Image (cartoon, rainbow, N blue to C red):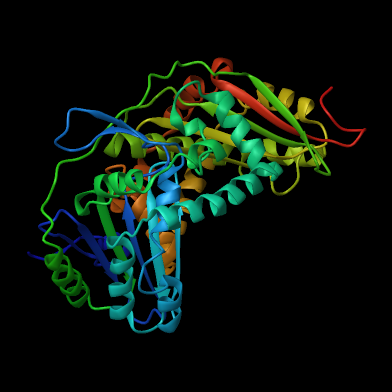
Amino acid sequence: MRNKTLSWEKMGESPVRERLDSGLELLVLPKPGLKKTYATYATHYGSIDSHFYRPGSKSPVQVPDGIAHFLEHKMYEKPQAQVFERFGELGAYTNAYTEYTTTTFLFSATSLVDECLKTLLWLVEEPYFTEENVAKEKGIIEQEIRMYLDMPGERLRSNLMQALYHNNPVRLDIAGSVESIHTITPEDLYLCYNTFYHPSNMVIFVAGDVNPKEIIDQIATLEQLRQVSHRSAVDRIFPQEPDGVAQSYVDQALPVASPLFMMGYKDTTTGLKGADLLRRDVTMGMLWSLLLGPSSRLLNDLYQDGLVNERFYAHYSSAATYGISVLGGETPDPKRLEAVLNDRLTQEPIRREDLERLKKKQLGEFVTLFEDPEDLAYLFNSLYFRGIDLVELPEAIEAISVTDLEEARQNHLVEAARSTSVVWPNHPQGGPS
């Protein structure tokens, strides 16, 4: 094992990176003087990974929807102690979250970092599933799912995803459904844990006032005790997805004071990896910043016309198997807002001077990100599992041209790839018209 110091000279940072014999990747970023140390232990496994081949097997496996989120919950249960209590005794905070393609466990601490790291590894590396504790968790997660069903913002987003996609599992709620989670067994959980929580499918990120060599040596010593060997990647199975949307419009009446509006564009440019995926991600993010960012003419006009408020947003997200642009917020007139957006999004001028100003802003935000280890860890993990090194981001930002943005707009903002979701107030004056 040999520690490698990466060259992040433009940011004035010197992270140390190491891959252990088990395949586990470590990245430690020393931040002298930073009061808080932040660490994540993440796996390339999320809610869309329900159909796959286990390494070394030729038989496909299909598991219930929502199992990645269920598994994340169950990792906090141990037979001998409570994980939250142990972190609390160390004066640390812990949490976890599941997304479409990743599951992440984390802690933040101001002291006793070595003990916190040991606890983080214990949390992630020692599963404990029984018939009894799995049955108990089903009731807890069922309540969580039903709570989401009553949240207008969640229904707005979920309805849009199901309208955009025919088959891609990104259309499904991350927590699954009440029906799907009740079919989960301890055997299912162990199967998914042993498949996706393997070190070669995971990464540890640590940022703080720490000694990288000491951190890496500590983790390496603990990992050697596990005697886990490097393993090939998991072969994931995804259904074919047509280019067009499943529905162009979907709505629902719920107890809201004002209508909620969300428009989405399904990206048909998929299958990208590494630098190509990063370039697509940056291009689309810049496109939405210029079209509907805080200083854009279109957003200002919408605001002045009373069609949107200051919480209106637009963003793009992607992985190798999907890409989605989503824009929305509250509006008194969803149909008029949709008509204005459809008319102007493809016509708004994209000016070179605005692009150059945006680049300076984003590069500045990237530099300040290194003072926020929590946001930095999130960005690092999201890029890492897409085959992207965080250090590549500034160069990708600099390389985008007005021509790139115009081409992306022409290919992406098309009617066949667009769906609209609306939540109407369910009082007598509300509802679809």
In the picture, measured across the screen, residue 424 lies left or right of residue 132, that is right
Against 210, residue 229 (above or below) is above
**Quadrant position of residue 366:** bottom left
**Quadrant position of residue 301:** top right
The location of residue 358, given as percent across then percent down, is: 51, 46
The location of residue 17, given as percent across then percent down, is: 19, 62
Q: Which residue lies furthest to the front in this view?
A: 132
In the picture, measured across the screen, residue 193 lies left or right of residue 313, that is left
Q: In which quarter of the image is the C terminus?
A: top right
In the picture, measured across the screen, residue 367 lies left or right of residue 414, that is left
Q: Residue furthest left?
A: 1
Q: In which quarter of the image is the N terminus?
A: bottom left
112 or 83: nearer the viewer? 83
Against 77, residue 251 (above or below) is above
Against 384, residue 235 (above or below) is above
186 or 258: nearer the viewer? 186
**Numbered label tally:** 0
The answer to whether residue 209 is visible is no
Residue visible at 46% across and 22% down? 167
The location of residue 397, given as percent across then percent down, is: 39, 44
**Quadrant position of residue 88:** bottom left
The answer to whether residue 329 is visible is yes
Against 161, residue 152 (above or below) is below
Residue visible at 27% across and 51% down? 197
